[in-house]
Structure formats: structure tokens, C-alpha cells
Image (cartoon, helix red, strand yellow):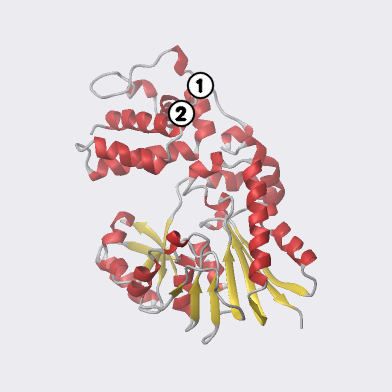
Amino acid sequence: MTPQARLSAAIEVLDRILAGASAEQALTNWGRASRFAGSGDRAALRDLVFDALRCKRSYAALGGALSGRGLVLGGLRDRGFDPAEWFTGEGHAPSVLCDGDTGFTPAGNVALDCPEWLAEPLQAALGADFAAVMQALRRRAPVFLRVNLAKASVAQAMSTLAAEGIVCQLNQLAKTALEVTDNARKIQNSQAYLGGLVELQDAASQAVIEALPLADGQRVLDYCSGGGGKALAMAAQAQVKLVAHDADPRRMRDIPARAARAGVSIAVTETQDIGKGYDLILTDVPCSGSGSWRRDPQGKWALTEARLTALCQIQADILDRAAGLLGPTGTLAYATCSMLGAENEHQIAAFLERHRGWSNPLQRRFSPLQGADGFFVALLTREA
């Protein structure tokens, strides 16, 4: 495909997304209907679409309309290109420019691609970093790997990856974190990945696990396990008796295969009868995902005030239930990939109000300005 044809394809896919389709669904459907497109074309199209979704407000302003055409036009103008050289109407190129394609230079929250209703709570949470963080979320997220210490050292993993042309560098957030700087698209077919030496996991997510007081012999519960990324990281850090649980057991269907590949043991439970008396419980709760909007840009625009209120109630309920499963000297860990105070510090303060005799020995935020996603972790323990 020519570069101009890729722009036309991006317009088509973005229009489907704006009409209500998920980005993954729209891209998959386009790929199935466009067998002529090679892997390079599909990768380039994906980049165009996700760049436009991350920058939807500013691109729509620059392009003159919130449409696939407007977003693609805005993207070209944002990168300093003259759209007239691309929108020629020749071959498979988009049709020539018209009066309706005139845009304007965005400013304020539009330029930052921040949903208007979230600007105030994000400013309250981020303070002086607000603008810089929002700018960071307009760009693609780095690709991070977690070295599986149950199978390899960091040096061994880096060497194995390098032998396959995958170049990485160490990341300061976590001792197991590697940032991929070249050939990221080779990872999932690499021997290092297929052999369980590395897993795809954000560096801040890894730092959350390093903040937990893990020790050999503990009974550990991953209460909101999902696909099991954090469970795998915990199992690789210490010889623990780990149970994975999720409200929707279907989310955990890949954990047994992933654990086998990683060489660790994780018990997956599909019932509500998960026992009590745990030494450590991790509640990586459902949240707005505001810290990971680079990876899920549709989530930024889909979030509503009503949904945020509902999420905060779910988070509080999970904390209350998990507290009842903890042993008397255990640690309850609370984590989100959110940057909003309502889901982070405010939740911990409210929990301490509801549960007298508990303390909060650790509370930490991770910012996208550190290179990875935005995350929050807090530890809760009963006072002696």
C-alpha cells in the first residue's frame, strides 16, 4: 500500500470507531476484508489509528471535524506535513481538500487532549505536572518486558533477546524491567518470550509488585487477577503459595499456560470460596485506567462521571471484602493504573475511616513522566 492509501484506510477505520466499534474490532475487520495488505501495512495503519485516538480533540481541531477524515488531516498538520500533498484524490489517496477541511490551532485542554470534565480532578491530583503528563499521554507508550527471575537473570535475558535482534535497556523503576528500544514487534515470536524468560509488562506495574512485602512460604491471594500478569510477577519473586481469583473467571483462562511457560505455580480458583487467613492480598482493582490511556486511548474518551462513581464504589467494596480474608498480621495491597485522587488517596483515606485499627505504612504514585504508565499502590495493615 502507498502512504496515501494507508491514510484512506485509517479514515475508514476511524469512522467505524467513531460510530461505536472498538479499535481492535475495527482494525481486525478491516484486515480480514483487505487481504492485499501486508504486515507492514497493518502495523502502519494501527499506528495511524491509535495516534489519532490518543490525540482526538487536538487532531479534530486541526482537521476541522471529528471524523476519520478530520482526524487524519489533523494528524498530518500536527506533524508539520502539508495535507494537500497527501490528499490528492489520485489512486487510493483521500479526496482533495475542500473548504470544510479548514481547522484551527488547539489550545488549553483541547491541545492537551484532556476530556473537559476530567481536567479539574486531574489538575488536583497531578499539580504542576498536569500539562506535562497530559502531553506524555498523547504519545505512544514504550514497550516494557519483565525478566522472569524464576528462569533467567536480567543479563541472561538481555543477551538472549539481543541474539534475536531485540535491543533493550534497563529501567530504573524496577530491577526486572527492560525497555525495548529496537525490534519490539519481534518479541512474541522470540525464543526469550516463548521460553518464558520474559513477559510483556509495564515497568510501573512491575514496580508495584516490588513494593509488596513478599516472602517465601506466604499464602498470597491475587484477588482481581485478570490475565495474571501481576500473579506471574509475584510467583517469580518468591516461593509463595499463590491463588488467583477474578470476578469473571474467563479473564483467567490463559493463566495456567502462562504459568507453565514461566515455570511457576499458580492455583486458579473459579469459585467465591477462596479461603481466609492470607499473608498478603493484592487488590489490583477495576479503575478508570487513566494512567494507561496511551495503551487504551478509547478508554479516555469513553469514561463518564457516572462510570467513575460506579468504579469508586466497586473499589471500596473490594477493599472491604478483601480485608475480611486477610490473616491478623497480613498485608492488604491496593493498586490502580489510575492518576485520579478519587480512586487512589481518597479510597485509602475512606478505608481507614471505615476500618479503625488499620494503618497505611506505604503509599506511592508512579507517573508517566517516569517513562512508564501511571500507577498507584498502597499497603494496609492492622495495627498491633
The alpha-carbon separation of the residues under discs 1 and 2 comes to: 8 Å
Q: Secondary structure at mark 1?
A: loop
Residue count near mark 1 (Cα–Cα under 10 Å), binned few <14, some 14–19, many ≥20 = some
Q: Is residue 212 visible?
A: no
Kindly identify the residue that appears in the image at 50 percent across and 34 percent down.
56
Instruction: Tell me the kind of residue under disc 1.
Output: Gly
Q: Nearer the viewer, residue 218 or 68?
A: 218
Q: Is residue 306 above or below residue 106?
A: below
The image shows residue 142 at horizontal and vertical percentages of: 44, 54
Q: Is residue 25 visible?
A: yes
Residue at the far bottom: name it: 217
Residue 192 located left or right of residue 213: left
Which residue corresponds to mark 2?
Answer: 74
Which dot marks residue 103?
1
Which dot marks residue 216?
none
Q: Nearer the viewer, residue 84 or 362?
A: 362
Q: Earlier in the sequence, mark 1 or mark 2?
A: 2
The answer to whether the residues at label 1 and label 2 have Cβ atoms under 8 Å apart is yes
Q: Nearer the viewer, residue 384 or 211?
A: 384
Kindly identify the residue that appears in the image at 26 percent across and 61 percent down.
189
Residue count near mark 2 (Cα–Cα under 10 Å), binned few <14, some 14–19, many ≥20 = many
Instruction: Tell me the kind of residue under disc 2.
Output: Gly
Kindly identify the residue that appears in the image at 36 percent across and 20 percent down.
84
State which quarter of the image contains the C terminus.
Answer: bottom right
